[in-house]
Amino acid sequence: MPHEKTVRLTTAQALVKFLSQQYVEIDGKKFKFIKGVFGIFGHGQVTGLGQALEQNADLLKYYRIQNEQGGVHIAVGAAKHLDRLGCFAVTSSIGPGASNMVTGAATATTNRIPVLLLPGDIFVDRQPDPVLQQIEQPRDLNMQVTDAFKPVCKYWDRVVTPQSLMTSAINAMRVLTDPADTGAVCLALPQDIQDQAYDYPEEFFKERVHRIDRRPISRQSLDIAVQKIKGKQRPVIIAGGGIHYSLASEQLKAFVEATGIPVTFTNSGNSALRWDQAQNLGGMGVMGTKAANIIAKTADLVIAIGTRLMDFTTVSKAAFQNPAVELLAINVSSFDAYKMDATQVLADAKEALDAIGKELKKLNYRVDKAYEAEYSKLKKEWDAEVDRLRAMKPEKGEKYLPQPAAIGVLNEFMGENDVMINAAGSMPGDLQRTWRCKAPKTYHVEYAFSTMGYEIAAGLGIKLVDPGREVYVIQGDGGYLMMHTEIVTSLMEHKKLTILLFDSEGFNSINGLATAHGSEGFGKGSKGFGNELRDRDPETDKLVGPFHLIDYAASARSYGAAAYTVTSLEDLKDALGKAKNEDKTTLIHIKIKRFSQSGNYESWWRVGVAETSTMEKVKAAHEKMKSNMKTARKY
């Protein structure tokens, strides 16, 4: 338009102004969407986006992080806790800073969590090529580090002119606020384009409200779902993260109470119901409860709500053994709803549960009393098993604590609305089996990508957006060594975390997996190959020397955090009480007994096992795997 009002800004300044005006709305409630920017400045963006953030500090809050991957994990933890109704951006320089964010991007996309990545990039005009940190591909000069984000992002663009920012930014928001197809979004920002000015139309900077419209269940899908449920005798629900993201915890509770259908959970869906709710059988699958897995084996209808049906949930597609079993998938994502040849119900979980529940109520539907009695008995037996696991004691004089018992101490200590966070190692299994959730949004376990090092950073993300809650981070020693430096950020931001460092002197989880499939190690007390934290033995030149012991409490203190070391369950209880009274991030170093985690209850997990080997235990493991695979669905 000839008389359109414009404002002259650099590309970076325009991006900051645009992002500050983005809102999301659901059920008539509006939320500011972009909560701030995490970053480490480098030559690729410090004088562009960095200058824009400094000049407009009142528009977007900037957080100085310690590691670019950690920054993405902070953003993911925050967005997940906010049920995807809020999002952070993360910026980096053009080279290693950008590539550091790739793991975080994959974590976000695998978990369907929105995060906006703003890495710097090379010069579009190419005049100074090759610049510092530039990747040079003779076959394609356009290929740069930022191209590595393409396979791990839901949307990717390189902003090659100031005016192209407008299309890029609006499409970025389209994906970030999409309830079915969200994840990491990357806008690569060439360093010369960041600083170029353009007369942007003022209309570009208007307040934009991105509505999340709930997808209602169609009449035909409603009829099909009702017919499926009422025609079956042994239905079971698998509830995934979609229950939280559609804000459907109350609808799920009402549905299972009215119908008597038992419900199991993925790690992402856990805490939607209290642990002691009558129909709650706990975690499903490889890391599931015995009660859930036994019921799943004989189920004739599996109602999968808001879940990706990953292999850990489906026991590598072997969880459902009833020849008459059918799957009914309720999901806003057609990609997920079509898995395992399910009958698809493309609808918002809250809308679908409410509508299906009303129709079943008209029919006076409820599962048979004998079925209720059966799963109730299994639930009671499982509760007793959890009590047994929590009652495990160290052997006399031993300073290594059984992992389930340590988890139980924390669970019993935490307040009803405190948040527990974990991601990788053997802990997610014990947590999904034994953690007793007391309220929604109190259980935060990232297991879609199982990202080692996620926990401390993501815990900080939760604390930033929900500062009134106490956040307890369970971190393995392997993950701590990979990434823990956002402890420093938590101290700089005065956001207290309580970190329980579970020290099993190596990769205890993967070591257990290896030994279960034939690994024997190299003697001298070694239990597996390449996973224990051992010094190299000078005589054999193998990693079978003494354990390399680390004072993790001293590590935390060196950053300025408080820290305690415990050697008994009583010490742990005392340290938790002291940590609660600390006014800053506190680490509790706990020695965990190796291989003390709970076992697989009525489940197995398919991993590759060598078809030929000179090791007898490996041969046996391969035969066992082949036998288990015969029970799995083929697609």
Image (spheres, rainbow, N blue to C red):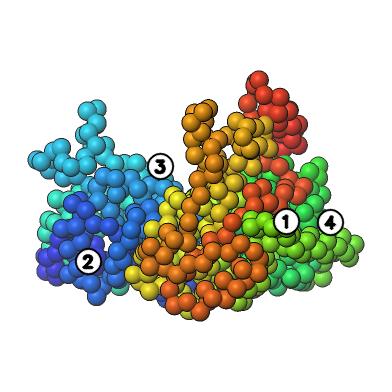
The CA distance from mark 2 to mark 4 is: 60 Å
* Sequence-wise first label, 1 or 4: 4
Between label 3 and label 2, give the one nearer the viewer.
Answer: 2
Q: Who's the residue at 29% across and 70% down the image?
A: 61
Between label 2 and label 1, give the one nearer the viewer.
Answer: 1
Badge 1 crowding class, 10 Å Cα cut-off, few under 14, some 14 to 19, many 20 or more, is few
Q: Which residue is mark 3?
A: 151
Of the pair 33 and 583, the residue shown nearer to us:
583
Q: Which residue is mark 4?
A: 233
Between label 1 and label 3, give the one nearer the viewer.
Answer: 1
Q: Position of residue 103 (x, y in %)?
A: 41, 48
The CA distance from mark 1 to mark 3 is: 49 Å
Amino acid beneath label 2: Leu
Badge 2 crowding class, 10 Å Cα cut-off, few under 14, some 14 to 19, many 20 or more, is many
The CA distance from mark 4 to mark 3 is: 43 Å
* Sequence-wise first label, 2 or 4: 2
Of the pair 252 and 118, the residue shown nearer to us:
118
Q: Is residue 217 visible?
A: no
Residue 53 marker: 2
- Compared with 621, 60 (above or below) is below
Q: Residue furthest right?
A: 370
Amino acid beneath label 3: Pro
- Compared with 35, 634 (above or below) is above
